[in-house]
Image (tube, coloured by chain):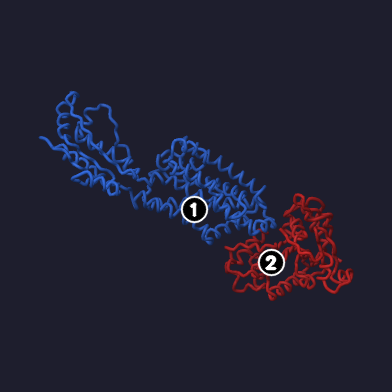
């Protein structure tokens, strides 16, 4: 093994990355743009995001000796999450909901205060209760609104009816939510681990394009006339793409940090996350070689690469979280699933890097990467060089 | 006469049912500039590819400087330099970077590599253009660069597959002068070309192949005398006919 020869080819690959606009975009600029776009869309620059939801409220309660509706509105507003807009009638509120100006419309019905008052004095005598329903309309175009708003309103309602202390007192067994840090995290925080895998997947396309391009131009054959061995050549490709994988991981981490991603974990977890990305880059080199074996030209390689890119993208990254249970089960067949899962464990769940789940994921990533890379090298050597 | 540096015995190369090289036997001598001529698809490039160790022969034996090409491929590869028919240069590297990359692949020490690269780049007219990306080069410049990439490690034997194709007359004459200099330094050069004038001007001996067979070999004068004609083109046309050949 002559490392000078390997190093010469690695240098050549890095020059190609910086000088070929398409490769520069896919390898360096794409991860920057991807992380920035997702970070700005789903997070907040420089810190965590506290979402506020505009809701419409129509108060049809006729009141009683105690005005429970005002108390309910006051509790809704005090959550800091809901910005309450009072409407005099439902039609206008529904129109604003349809236009996306509101995330929800809530109607406090007639008899609300009376029902609350009866409950207060006859809390154990259910036969005396007066039933009222509070209609809640949600923005159907917003997954966050449909999931986040109902429990917030439910909480405000409970506080109104039972009071904050009474709620705790009457229930000897209760859920302690003080440890839950969900409210401090943004949607981007949940996406960030998947972004690492997402960007690396595109190495498949650059590797396939590079090999088919060099084959078309007679460069692979020309290199074959030199004393360079096939092993030295393949090692140079693996080294250079691992280097690019590492650069991508650093870029994504730096950009994610810039837009507010702050994993509160020890350095070992971050180092292992980077090692996982390095290993995963080998897998994508393997997929790239398989693509280059199949593809007749560099143009065809770009299209064929999506055979490997799309399943990994949709089943194995943050996109997969929104899929059906069946699709998520199928996701376990793609290596990127384990990358996302391992990095989520390391950076979000704060699992120690030596914990079983991380080690199992990492083991699967190593095994699948070696298999895919070996298959890629053998198939390209056997069928792809001509 | 010098010792034969390349010995080809009953070489056969088949691709499926098609025979590209058919029982070709030939000796090329040390320090010789040998021209391999033939119509498109005659088997010239396939023969060169077998000699360089790129293709495994179907039958026969090839020795390069005493090394069996099939069994001692890496030794053969370190002795030779190959300028392929395709203008195979990395477009995202400069001329100098391309040359130095290939010199590195032959294991040339850094200092010698830089010296050789600069000498050859200047010698073939790259003053001021050596550090420009090859994507900006003309076709002729790329061909000249390709030749330098084949010779940067100062090989004993050079296989040049149509090295002057697409060059203007000035470039072609510069390359011819350069090849004569190489021959003057005792290098063995195997050249394929479609330019009869080039073969007449440069080659010590000429071999003509057609349908994979070596159908004539000798010096220019021997061939003219043997076929009773005044120029190499007449020899060539007499032996290979006037039918247009296409190569897939």
In the depicted structure, whether residue B88 falls above or below residue A312: below
Q: Is residue B114 left or right of residue B232?
A: left
Chain identifier, blue in the render: A
Quarter in which the C terminus of chain B is drawn: bottom right
Give the colour chain B carries in the figure: red
Residue A275 visible: no
Mark 2 crowdedness (10 Å alpha carbons): few <14, some 14-19, many ≥20: many
Between disc 1 and disc 2, the foreground one is 2
Q: Which residue is mark 2?
A: B147
Residue B144 screen position, x and y as percent = 67, 69
Quarter in which the N terminus of chain B is drawn: bottom right
Mark 1 crowdedness (10 Å alpha carbons): few <14, some 14-19, many ≥20: some
Chain identifier of the residue bearing label 1 in the image: A
Disc 1/disc 2 C-alpha distance (Å): 36 Å
**What residue is at 43 percent from the left and 52 percent from the top?**
A34
**What residue is at 74 percent from the left and 53 percent from the top?**
B55
**What residue is at 44 percent from the left and 51 percent from the top?**
A252
Residue A270 screen position, x and y as percent = 44, 45
Outermost residue, front direction? A91
Q: Which residue is mark 1?
A: A247
Chain identifier of the residue bearing label 2 in the image: B
Same subunit: marks 1 and 2: no
Pick the residue in front: A296 or A384.
Answer: A296
Residue A35 screen position, x and y as percent = 42, 52
Tell me, for residue A223, which label it has, or none. none
């Amino acid at each position: 093994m002559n490392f000078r020869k390997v190093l010469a080819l690695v240098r050549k690959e890095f020059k190609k990355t910086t000088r070929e606009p398409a490769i520069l975009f896919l390898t360096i600029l794409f991860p920057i743009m991807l992380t920035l776009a997702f970070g700005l869309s789903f997070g907040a620059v420089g810190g965590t995001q506290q979402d506020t939801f505009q809701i419409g409220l129509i108060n049809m309660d006729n009141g009683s000796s105690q005005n429970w509706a005002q108390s309910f509105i006051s509790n809704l507003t005090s959550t800091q999450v809901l910005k309450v807009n009072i409407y005099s009638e439902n039609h206008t509120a529904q129109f604003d909901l349809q236009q996306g100006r509101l995330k929800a419309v809530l109607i406090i019905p007639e008899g609300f205060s009376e029902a609350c008052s009866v409950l207060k004095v006859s809390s154990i005598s259910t036969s005396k209760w007066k039933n009222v329903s509070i209609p809640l309309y949600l923005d159907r175009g917003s997954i966050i609104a449909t999931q986040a708003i109902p429990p917030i309103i439910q909480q405000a309602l409970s506080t109104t009816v039972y009071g904050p202390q009474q709620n705790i007192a009457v229930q000897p067994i209760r859920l302690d939510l003080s440890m839950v840090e969900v409210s401090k995290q943004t949607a981007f925080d949940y996406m960030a681990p998947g972004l690492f895998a997402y960007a690396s997947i595109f190495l498949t396309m650059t590797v396939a394009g590079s090999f088919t391009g060099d084959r078309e131009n007679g460069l692979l054959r020309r290199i074959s006339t030199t004393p360079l061995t096939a092993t030295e050549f393949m090692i140079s490709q693996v080294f250079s793409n691992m280097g690019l994988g590492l650069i991508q991981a650093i870029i994504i981490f730096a950009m994610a940090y810039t837009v507010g991603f702050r994993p509160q974990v020890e350095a070992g977890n971050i180092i292992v996350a980077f090692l996982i990305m390095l290993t995963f880059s080998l897998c994508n080199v393997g997929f790239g070689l398989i693509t280059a074996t199949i593809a007749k030209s560099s143009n065809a390689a770009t299209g064929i690469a999506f055979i490997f890119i799309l399943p990994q993208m949709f089943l194995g990254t943050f996109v997969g979280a929104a899929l059906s249970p069946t699709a998520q089960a199928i996701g376990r067949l793609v290596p990127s699933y384990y990358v996302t899962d391992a990095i989520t464990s390391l950076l979000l769940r704060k699992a120690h890097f030596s914990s079983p789940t991380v080690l199992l994921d990492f083991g699967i990533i190593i095994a699948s990467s070696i298999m895919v890379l070996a298959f890629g090298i053998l198939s390209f050597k056997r069928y792809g060089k001509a | 006469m010098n010792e034969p540096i390349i010995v080809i015995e009953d070489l056969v190369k088949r691709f499926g049912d098609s025979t590209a090289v058919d029982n070709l036997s030939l000796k090329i001598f040390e320090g010789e500039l040998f021209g391999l001529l033939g119509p498109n698809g005659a088997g010239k490039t396939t023969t060169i590819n077998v000699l360089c160790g790129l293709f495994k022969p179907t039958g026969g034996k090839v020795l390069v400087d005493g090394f069996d090409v099939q069994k001692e491929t890496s030794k053969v590869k370190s002795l030779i330099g190959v300028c392929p028919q395709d203008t195979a240069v990395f477009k995202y590297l400069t001329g100098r970077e391309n040359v130095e990359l290939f010199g590195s692949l032959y294991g040339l020490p850094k200092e010698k590599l830089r010296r050789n690269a600069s000498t050859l780049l200047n010698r073939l007219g790259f003053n001021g253009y050596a550090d420009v990306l090859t994507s900006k080069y003309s076709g002729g410049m790329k061909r000249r660069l390709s030749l330098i990439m084949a010779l940067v490690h100062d090989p004993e034997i050079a296989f040049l597959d149509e090295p002057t194709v697409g060059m203007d007359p000035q470039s072609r004459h510069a390359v011819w002068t350069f090849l004569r200099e190489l021959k003057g330094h005792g290098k063995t050069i195997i050249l394929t070309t479609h330019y009869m004038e080039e073969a007449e001007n440069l080659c010590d001996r000429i071999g003509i192949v057609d349908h994979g067979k070596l159908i004539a070999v000798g010096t220019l004068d021997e061939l003219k005398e043997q076929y009773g004609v005044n120029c190499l083109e007449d020899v060539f046309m007499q032996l290979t006919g006037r039918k247009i050949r296409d190569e897939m």
